[in-house]
Amino acid sequence: FSTVPASPGSAQQTIVRTGTGEYQWIDGRQYVGEWKLDLRHGHGQYLYPNGDIFEGQFHTGQRNGMGRFEFYKDGAVMEG
């Protein structure tokens, strides 16, 4: 991820997820993919704590467009 100024003209730096990377939340959710301005944006894979997986497109932090959702419990797959 890149480091950008906290505010215009500021010498203080903060981490803003932009580019390709991985993040895991404390509850076990995980995202691996593209980020833009600290939001899931582009192609990525979102793993749920129960084992379900979504792989596809994200836009401003939300699933958007084409993708594939795989249910861990029974192996069912939804695409679209």
Image (spheres, grey):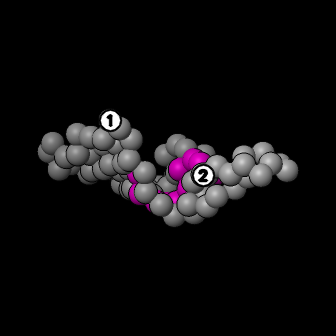
On the image, the x and y values in percent for residue 9 come to 85, 50
On the image, the x and y values in percent for residue 73 come to 15, 42
Q: Which mark is residue 15?
A: 2
Residue 60 included in the magenta stretch of the image: no
Q: Is residue 19 left or right of residue 4?
A: left
Magenta residues, start to end: 31-43
Q: Is residue 7 left or right of residue 45?
A: right
- In depth, the one of 36 and 42 nearer the eye is 36
Q: Residues within 10 Å of mark 1 (few under 14, many from 20)?
A: few
- Name which residue lies at 78% across and 45% down: 7
Q: Is residue 9 left or right of residue 2?
A: right
Kind of residue indicated by mark 1: Asp
- In depth, the one of 13 and 45 nearer the eye is 13
Element under disc 2:
strand
In the displayed structure, 43 sits above or below 58; it is: below
On the image, the x and y values in percent for residue 4 come to 69, 56
Which label's residue is closer to the chain start, 2 or 1? 2
Q: Residue furthest left?
A: 74
- Name which residue lies at 23% across and 45% down: 51
- Tell us which disc is closer to us: 2 or 1: 2
| Quadrant where the image shows the N terminus | bottom right
Q: Which mark is residue 27?
A: 1
